[in-house]
Amino acid sequence: MKINGNRLLETLKKLGATGREESGALSRVAATDNDKAGRDLFVSWLKESGLNVKVDQMGNIFGILETEENKNKEPIVIGSHIDSVINAGIYDGCYGVLSGLEVIRTLKENNYKLERPIIVGAFTNEEGIRFQPDMMGSLVFVRGLPVEEALNSKAIENPELILKSELQRIGYYGNEKPGFFKPYAYLELHVEQGPILDYEKISIGAVENLQGISWQKVTVHGEANHAGTTPTRLRKDAGYVTAKIITFLRDLANNSNEKTVATVGIIEFEPNAINVIPSKSTFTIDLRNPNEEKLKANEEALKNYLEKLRIEEGVEIETERLVRFLPVTFDERIVKIIESVAKDKNYSCRRMTSGAGHDAQMMSRICPTAMIFVPSYKGISHNPAEFTEDEDLLKGTSVLLDVVTKL
Amino acid sequence: MKINGNRLLETLKKLGATGREESGALSRVAATDNDKAGRDLFVSWLKESGLNVKVDQMGNIFGILETEENKNKEPIVIGSHIDSVINAGIYDGCYGVLSGLEVIRTLKENNYKLERPIIVGAFTNEEGIRFQPDMMGSLVFVRGLPVEEALNSKAIENPELILKSELQRIGYYGNEKPGFFKPYAYLELHVEQGPILDYEKISIGAVENLQGISWQKVTVHGEANHAGTTPTRLRKDAGYVTAKIITFLRDLANNSNEKTVATVGIIEFEPNAINVIPSKSTFTIDLRNPNEEKLKANEEALKNYLEKLRIEEGVEIETERLVRFLPVTFDERIVKIIESVAKDKNYSCRRMTSGAGHDAQMMSRICPTAMIFVPSYKGISHNPAEFTEDEDLLKGTSVLLDVVTKL
């Protein structure tokens, strides 16, 4: 039994050509007209394939293949999302959803005897560009957020528009209650959105866990003074203190045996003048580790270091928590199946951690879950330059097919 | 012979009350109406004191006290500036000019027999806020810049206005050629604009030199990547490289026995997003040392460090020179006289380096020059909160008087 590679690549291209701006940019932001165009195309394929299509109140779309014999059993679900960021690439999310569709089509065409129903799902608003929070559809599906609250969330461009009315407008406010079925297992195939597989020339990532994320905003209050006349020992240089923190974070990452990553992405000095010592520096810290205890230890080490700097440098330091997600550990049995399938096929494979958030992290709350990654060229994502070789795409979908049959 | 302290403080207050915006902010920016108001007041005092007033083509104003006997001798000049930054304090520049006036008034009232003429001068556009470069009037006076070129410089708010037409408009395009007399010596009394005297509770600074200044703009080109999915070893983090440079500069300053000061005052990251590794960082470096060889060595050490980072971190680093001033060494004989006068008066005194630029650095090119500093509260300057105790102001002017008579 083999997937139809051309058909898969064709659907990926067609969906990628749908929902583009006049400029040519692909922007299927959640619950916009462009999103509707992508959804309509996807639903037409589900129907064409003879699947039972159900849409829930969150606009999550499910294509169900079931038989009289297996319809009372818990289904295997393959999912991801087809909404996108602004000016996106064509793989993020779509590759997983359309691979699910291809797997179902292949099973059906081969009259494969399914012990359980199999469902392909596209979750609403994974990107969180227009409505907060991100991964919203799957979060509500697993009852991590009340459906009413999610439907009331306001569009970023116009607070008078709420998700519910926007879903109604595009025709995707469905009848089903989110969580209307309980999966036996959840699988998500995704482009890595990171450089590891590409850099190491490995075809398949067996994703064993997903990093915990800690975002903080830090403000250092020093003292503005003349850059020429203030001796070093009398300085309270908010910029220097910031530089110390950035190098401390790098040391933290280096000493963590590659598990911790730390990034300072946003920075602002005041008064931001060439000959004035910065009186104030505001910056963000993005800290991630797949192990909650270690992430906590990193946060604690950072806190202690800030206290040390406060005393040594005579500055005040405020921190504000912006985001905190617990790490997720995926299902060991499924991860092992992914590894063994890749081995059987002679595809290079490694275990890895997802650095980004995915719908799988929500689904793992209610059923055994794992993810399969394929390489992203240079790790580029959320960008039209996002790219994965066709060969890698087909390998990923083949692995997905065999994992489904083994399950 | 004693200065009239009340008169000095009175003139300082009156000049400080002149040239204010409706908001109350003091802004006597060069060749504006507010500058004219300050100049008119100063000239009225010069005339009231029976001085011979001369204005050169740069708008530099000189009040000359000379006699038939000494008029062919080189004059002692006491100078500074009365133009200001926007929203300024009342001391910067004005204190030196008005102390010069007070010294001349005192000498005159006491019928002190002057061996040489004595001149109080106010140089045009020391601040360089509206016309570039700063210290322009004194620079042209010492023939460091052709007068035509300076007069053609464009106002920052409207390039159709040039300095010449603005000086003509306010009535201060004078007849004299800049440099129309050669000083025997030049003295400048100034508030420190730095915290050293205030911090060390010292009354008088005998300024022996003025720092060389090296300003550079640095751009680090790294690679934008996902903050969650990019392992530390694969990062080309322009922000981290910047932090390394900032801490390197602090080490450079710490290892220089307090002579080097280094400041990164301006910074900007791109794309400046919380979960994206900075692809680009642009920042400024302000490096100062009173010794040219040492300043050069610092610049060289920085250059080597940038090269090291370029290789180690896989980034590209561009540097652009913005400003480079040679250090200035003041006249040892005059510095010693300042010290001995302070000692005679039982005023605490220390030798020091000026971290900021002053008209004295230009004048030192053509005659023996030195500066006297008095404390600035917390080193605050270019700010309405600029403050020096009356007692310290009077001490400084008393020292100036005695230095003049000893010269």
Image: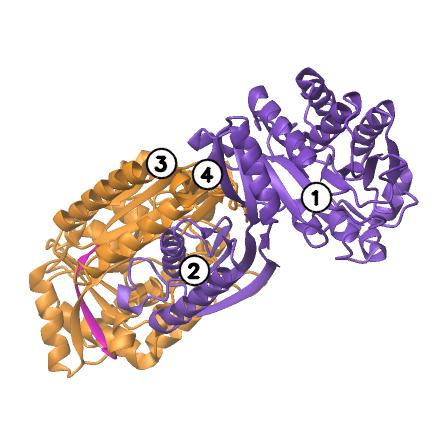
Chain colours: A purple, B orange
Q: Where is residue A328 in the image (x, y as percent from the top left)?
A: 60, 53
Q: Which of marks 4 and 2 is in front?
A: 4
Q: Position of residue B190 (x, y in %)?
A: 28, 65
- Of callouts 4 and 2, the N-terminal one: 2
Share a chain, discs 3 and 2?
Answer: yes
Task: Give the spatial CA distance, label 1 vs label 2.
Answer: 79 Å
Task: Give the spatial CA distance, label 3 vs label 1.
Answer: 41 Å
Does any portion of residue B26 appear in the rendered image? no
Which numbered tag is attached to residue B38? 2
Which amino acid, mark 3?
Answer: Val
Task: Give the spatial CA distance, label 4 vs label 2.
Answer: 49 Å
Does any portion of residue A342 appear in the rendered image? yes
Task: Identify residue for label 1.
Answer: A186
Identify the residue at horizontal 42%, vertical 52% (top origin).
A273
Point out the image quarter for the N terminus of chain A. Answer: top right
Residue extent of the magenta highlight: B201-211
Task: Give the spatial CA distance, label 3 vs label 2.
Answer: 52 Å
Local crowd at mark 4 within 10 Å, few (<14), some, or many (≥20)?
Answer: many
Q: In this view, does A230 lie to the left or right of A84?
A: left
**Secondary element type, mark 3:** loop
Establish if A189 lies above or below B107: above
C-beta proximity under 8 Å, tags 3 and 1: no
Task: Identify residue for label 4.
Answer: B279
Which amino acid, mark 4?
Answer: Ser
Which amino acid, mark 1?
Answer: Tyr
Which amino acid, mark 2?
Answer: Gly
